[in-house]
Image (tube, coloured by chain):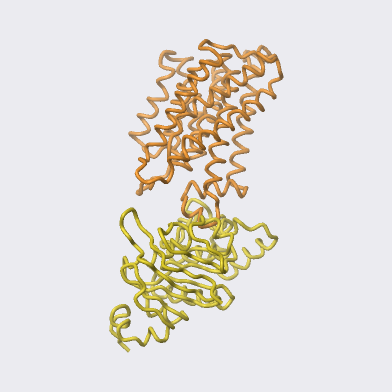
Amino acid sequence: MTLLKVSGIETYYGKIQALKGVSLDVEQGKIVTILGANGAGKTTTMKTIAGLLKPKSGTVEFLGENITGLRPDQLVKRGISLVPEGRAILSGMTVMENLEMGAYQRNDKEIAKDLEDVMQRFPILKERKNQLGGTLSGGQQQMLAIARALLSRPKLLLLDEPSMGLAPLIVADIFKIIKEIKDSGTTVLVVEQNARQALKIADYGYVLETGKVIVHGPSHELLEDPRIMEAYLGKKSE
Amino acid sequence: MLLEQIINGITLGSIYAIVALGFTLVFGVLGIINMAHGEIFMFGAFIGVTVTSTLGLPIWMAFLAAIAATAILGYLLEQFALRPLRGKKGVSHLAPLISTIGVSIFLENLSHHLFGAGNHPFKSSFAEIHYTIGSITIYLVQILIFVISVILMIALSYWLSKTKAGKALRATAENLETASILGVNTKQIITLTVIIASAMGGIAGILVGMAFNSVNPQMGLSIGLKGLAIIILGGMGNVKGAMAGGLILGLAETFIVAYGDSGYRDAIAFIAIIVILLIRPQGLFGKKTSEGRP
């Protein structure tokens, strides 16, 4: 079943056209990745889906509903949660308050249990729950940002460059976590520069270039496509 | 009497703190100085005069009426002077500031029209009640002002740190975009902030009316400028800074009148700004920041 259907979106920054008709589908229960060089329009695509940017034309459908142009908070209500590039930790609020903000729209009785679960899964967050978010290291902030987004119980998690600026060991952790999120039933759309690693965990991939999708296909096919290898994955070394 | 001056200073300072909190809340969320805050405060004072002196009703009704009236003014300010300018392409970030100056001029003239230009005494049935302990005289009004201010400050601090809406306000103040992707309807939170700030201004208006027994349409400007001085002193957008800055200014003014030259009373605030900008430009409680607001 198609969870998210993006059709021909064109998004502008002022007069500059960043997306020239991007279309993509995200199947429920899968990890889909968007690859591409700097400036290809990956972040713009994510921001448009999450409601931070409004497309000039094209539509975004979620579970069959047209959600184009809705505000981010309305999309959180429908089950879309974004972990933006740079993690966007609330640095003046404690780790615990950051997590609580993740559950902002929920009123159910399981919030306390979910907070406990999240801290079981990321023990470092429990250890630092009373520290200000701004005092965490980059890797810890990324964990916090992902944990916070999960606390809204999203159907679709949008991750924008989760491995950016992190040490290789931590990057491996993050990819493991993304895999676990999928296994627990949440669909993931992830933007990455780290193309090889992203394709290894993803089911399907889209490659963007200057605001357009140039190639898309199942991950294993993209991994074997010599053109993609050359352009985005570097020469194969193994 | 030193102790008496301290009491006077704390009374004045706690009013200043309430005024400054109104500025600092709006600055925190919108990144602008609400130049109409002083005039909203003045309106609160006039509502207080009207309810107590003209209608002869008890003081608690004056508070309720002033809170209601200034909250509505805050809502209208957001709806008509601030929101239309937000997030539009080609609108300068200074536009909302200018627009609040417009509102302040409008409100000052409106109050000339409604209440007249002169001074209005603030009659309350207990204005003369005082207690003498040894050589110290404390007026009931002073105690009332102090207690109301402290309750208000504690309530606001609690609300900001413990409640969901308070946390959403802080998240919005820190980063609007982040708050929105976490599910906060930032438009609603901004409106709520302007309303709360204005209602606090209204309460401060009555407190000042009671403290000085005088209300006039020009009072908004001077108190507004002092509120501004206080948030620069305490750190822009900082709640603790507004409270501490208010108390410091209140005490400083009282002491300069008692032990120095009363002519410098209103200059103290601005001397404090100059000093603080030279030594600690981020304010007493402000954090150094390398990045500017967007």
Q: Nearer the viewer, residue B122 or A141?
A: B122
Compared with B40, B288 (above or below) is below
Reply above or below: A94 against B282: below
Q: In this view, does A161 lie to the left or right of A117?
A: left
Say which quarter of the image contains residue A103.
Answer: bottom right
- Percent position (x, y) of residue A104? 59, 56
Image side of residue A79 versus residue A213, left or right: right
Farthest residue to the top: give it: B118
Q: Which of A18 and B38 is in front in this view?
A: A18
Please report the residue visible at 68 percent of the width from the left and 60 percent of the height from the top. Answer: A108
Please give the letter of the chain rendered in orange: B
Residue A233 spot, x, y in % from top left: 32, 80
Residue A75 locus on image (x, y percent): 54, 60
Which quadrant of the figure contains the N terminus of chain A? bottom right
Identify the residue at image location x=47%, y=15%: B257
Residues B150 and B191: in front is B191
| Residue A115 lies in quadrant | bottom right
Query: What hue does chain A carry in this figure?
Result: yellow
- In the displayed image of the protein, which residue is found farthest to the front? A57
What residue is rendered at 55% in x and 29% in y? B201
